[in-house]
Image (spheres, rainbow, N blue to C red):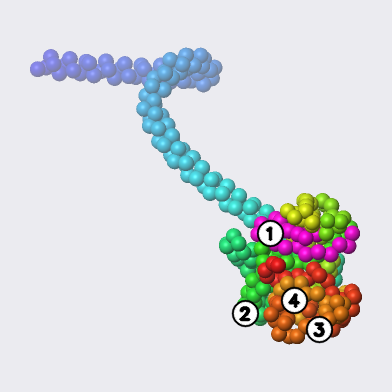
Amino acid sequence: MRTDNATLFAEGAVSTLRLIVYLAVAIALMVLDHRGNYLESVRRVAGTVVEPVYRLASLPAQLARATRTAVVTQDQLASENRQLREQLLLAQARLNRLDALVAQNERLKSLLDAQKNLGLSVQLARLINVDLDPSRHRIVLDVGANQNVTVGQPVIDAQGVMGQIVEVLPNSSIAMLLSDATHAIPVVVERTGLRTIAYGSGDIDRLQLPNIPISADVRVGDKLLTSGLGGRFPAGFPVGEIRKVSPDRSGMFTAAEAQPAAALDRSAEVLLLRDQPQPYGPPAPREEVGPPVENPAAAGRPPPSPSRIAGEGRAIGVADAAMRAGPSSSDPSQPRAAGRP
């Protein structure tokens, strides 16, 4: 028993002595390294040897961190892409709206320029609906009787005549376009002064001019203007341009086709003309139009009775023509609000 204790004591003493020696050596090395930096190369080599061990030990943590970062980054990228797509769509919508506003401003500016240049008394109106019936070319405007709109009021845009008001409601009105198959308007060829009537064809981009005298000088490219006859459309407004001239089926007359000057299928804002001074005397009553009426005084016959006028169909300006009896007071090409001969 004593031997075991002595052995243990001797081993403890040896261990303690060894620890003291190690501490002394460590202290000496630290002092020498601090003063002379003698162990720098040793530390560098030891660090190089130990570094792979550190990397290997930290590899699981790095893998876990990289995996977590990848998942989070993918979610963030998906969210950012979604936000960017929404912002792009919003920006495109705003840009389209801006383009629409620019176009609308241009149209309004052209309308105001037309009013200013011609010195017209006009009323601005906006298109709010279109008649979908293919046989009726009519539009609905946002002004009506409460805004002093009347039946027969001419409708124009910046390029020319569009049509006329045919029905008035309290706060809206219906306008018939020139291209409607039941519409007719007296026109004059700007180049030659030839008077005729332009009828709607049922096609939005085509007007018909039948029964032109075969000897008349009508050419492709001729401009058509309102003649002012009938008292409904003031004279001098662009109506269209001749696009085709050919003999009719009988060979006794010339038939022409014209393209409307106004943007019948594109205008969103229009102008309603108020009463304008007529160059052909006081305005005639605005009535439905029937077949052209010959001036009875010019033909040497007594004026027709009211019953005869009603039977033949009331013509625009017929009463005026009878009052202004004379060789030049009647025009065989009177406009019709509806129907054809």
Local SS, label 3: loop
Instruction: Assess whether mark 3 and mark 2 are in contact (beta carbons under 8 angstroms).
Output: no
Locate the C terminus and report the quarter of the image it occupies. bottom right
Q: Is residue 222 above or below residue 28?
A: below
Q: Is residue 191 above or below residue 272?
A: above
Residue 228 sits inside the magenta stretch: no
Q: Label 3 is placed on what type of residue? A: Pro
User: Which residue does the numbered mark 3 point to in the structure image?
Assistant: 303
Q: Label 4 is placed on what type of residue? A: Ala
- Span shown in magenta: 192-212
Q: Residue at x 70, y 71 (%)?
A: 337
How far apart are the alpha carbons under marks 1 and 4? 21 Å
Q: Label 2 is placed on what type of residue? A: Pro
Q: Which quadrant of the figure has residue 14?
A: top left
Local SS, label 4: loop
Q: Residue at x 57, y 62 (%)?
A: 132
User: Which residue does the numbered mark 1 point to in the structure image?
Assistant: 201
How far apart are the alpha carbons under marks 2 and 3? 39 Å
User: Which residue does the numbered mark 4 point to in the structure image?
Assistant: 315
Marked residue nearer the N-terminal end (4 or 2): 2
Q: What is the tally of numbered marks visible in this picture?
A: 4
Marked residue nearer the N-terminal end (3 or 4): 3
**Residue density around tag 2, few if under 14, some if 14–19, many if 20 or more, within 10 Å:** few
Q: Nearer the viewer, mark 2 or mark 3?
A: 3
Locate the N terminus and report the quarter of the image it occupies. top left
Residue 170 tag number: 2
Where residue 31 appears, x then y in whole percent? 48, 20
